[in-house]
């Protein structure tokens, strides 16, 4: 039974993971991160889980790595840090991951949010990489994913000053996909998840993989990957079903085959 997260399946195809460490603004202690990585590993192999939503509470999505825990770790501790594998596991999740963000998404919290594929933010959300205030730098993808998301000037400003940005600013910069009322973030994330959960799972998986390729490869390689993925899907029963359903003017029923 996880201690710091709550895992629910509120509807068919959708898994909702809620970070539950309010006493520390959902700071990502190693146990919490391990539980999260484990929950995603389980969802990866669960055919019924088509989309996963991660959320926090109204005050914080997550206020970063646990600073008290960090204070205990020396250089060797950091070299042997199990958190690296947990982060890799989270980033490698192959199904759609939606973050529903209210309040603080700082440091590791912002990095966790950037591991998600779609981000629904409440107007009350604040994003930042304040590690510089602690004499360190982001260590879970903050310098790399932030720059790719918002471009150099804003990424530099956020990482070098530790300043936070508002949800509106994050939307304008391309860091989040939508901004909604604070009380509606999870509901809106559920709507988006519902829309994805009824699609062909193999097409969804390859679409995610192809889009992520765009962030870390050159255009020619990315286009080649896209073409191969597109061709692969021609061998699926769901492609036949999708096209037949369109021609017969009915809703497609995808099986993930
Ligand atoms: N780690 C551990 N505990 C944290 C925490 C964190 N990242 N963030 C908040 N808390 C704790 C506070 O210590 C406090 O605990 P106590 O009640 O026991 O004192 C509790 O959560 C509530 O926090 P505050 O009283 O500070 O709440 P606030 O509303 O006054 O301020 C805040 C909110 C501005 C987010 C402030 O808590 C803050 O600055 N937190 C730290 C943010 C930060 O620096 N994050 C980066 C961490 S490093 C990192 O993430 C490295 C990486 O790249 C992986």
Image (spheres, rainbow, N blue to C red):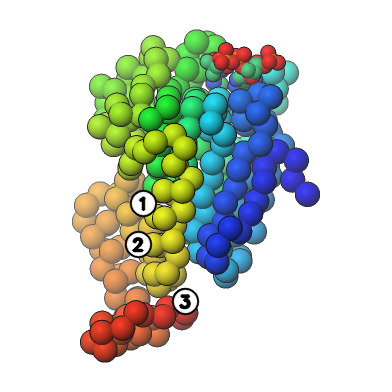
Label 3: which secondary element: loop
- What residue would you read off at disc 2? 207
Crowding around mark 3 (Cα neighbors within 10 Å: few <14, some 14 to 19, many 20+) is some
For marks 2 and 1, give the CA distance: 9 Å
Quadrant of ligand 1 in image: top right
Frontmost residue, 195 versus 214: 195
For this orientation, the residue located farthest to the right is 1
Could you tell me which residue is drawn at 47 percent across and 79 percent down?
Answer: 255
Mark 3–mark 1 Cα distance, whole angstroms, equals: 21 Å
Q: In the structure shown, which secondary structural element does the residue marked by tag 1 occupy? A: helix
Per the rendering, the mark at residue 256 is: 3
User: Which residue is drawn at the image coordinates 32% and 46% (left, top)?
Assistant: 215
Q: Which residue is mark 1?
A: 212
Q: Quote the CA–CA distance across marks 3 and 2.
A: 14 Å
Expressed as whole percent of the image width and height from the top left, the position of residue 126 reads 43, 25
Q: Quadrant of residue 28?
A: top right
Residue 189 placement, left or right of 226: right
Mark 2 or mark 1: whose residue is earlier in sequence: 2
Determine the secondary structure under disc 2. Answer: helix
In the rendered structure, which disc, 3 or 1, sits on the residue that comes first in sequence? 1
In this rendering, position of residue 133 left or right of residue 28: left
Relative to 256, say whether 169 is above or below: above
Q: Nearer the viewer, mark 3 or mark 1?
A: 3
Q: Is mark 2 within 8 Å of ligand 1?
A: no
User: Closer to the camera, 178 or 117?
Assistant: 178
Return the disc, 3 or 2, that comes first in the chain's sequence: 2
Crowding at dot 1, Cα within 10 Å, few <14 / some 14-19 / many 20+, comes out as few
Residue 81 at least partly seen: no
Quarter assignment of residue 234: bottom left
| Circles 2 and 1 in contact, beta carbons < 8 Å | no
């Amino acid at each position: 039974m996880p201690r710091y997260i709550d895992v629910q399946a509120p509807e068919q195809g959708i898994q909702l993971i809620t970070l539950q460490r309010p006493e520390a603004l959902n700071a990502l202690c190693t146990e919490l991160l391990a539980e999260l990585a484990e929950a995603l590993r389980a969802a990866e192999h669960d055919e019924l889980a088509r989309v996963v939503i991660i959320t926090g509470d109204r005050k914080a999505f997550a206020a970063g790595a646990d600073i008290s825990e960090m204070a205990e770790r020396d250089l060797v501790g950091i070299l042997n840090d199990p958190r690296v594998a947990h982060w890799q596991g989270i980033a490698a999740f192959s199904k759609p991951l939606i973050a529903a963000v209210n309040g603080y998404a700082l440091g590791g919290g912002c990095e966790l949010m950037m591991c998600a594929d779609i981000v629904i933010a409440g107007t009350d959300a604040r994003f930042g990489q304040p590690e510089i205030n602690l004499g360190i730098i982001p260590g879970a993808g903050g310098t790399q994913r932030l720059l790719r998301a918002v471009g150099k000037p804003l990424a530099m400003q956020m990482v070098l000053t530790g300043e936070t940005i508002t949800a509106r600013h994050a939307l304008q910069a391309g860091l989040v996909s939508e901004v909604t009322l604070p009380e509606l973030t999870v509901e809106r994330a559920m709507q988006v998840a519902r829309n994805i959960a009824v699609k062909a799972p193999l097409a969804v998986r390859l679409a995610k993989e192809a889009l992520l390729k765009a962030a870390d490869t050159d255009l020619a390689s990315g286009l080649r990957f896209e073409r191969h993925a597109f061709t692969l899907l021609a061998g699926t029963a769901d492609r036949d079903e999708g096209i037949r359903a369109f021609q017969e003017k009915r809703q497609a029923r995808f099986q993930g085959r």
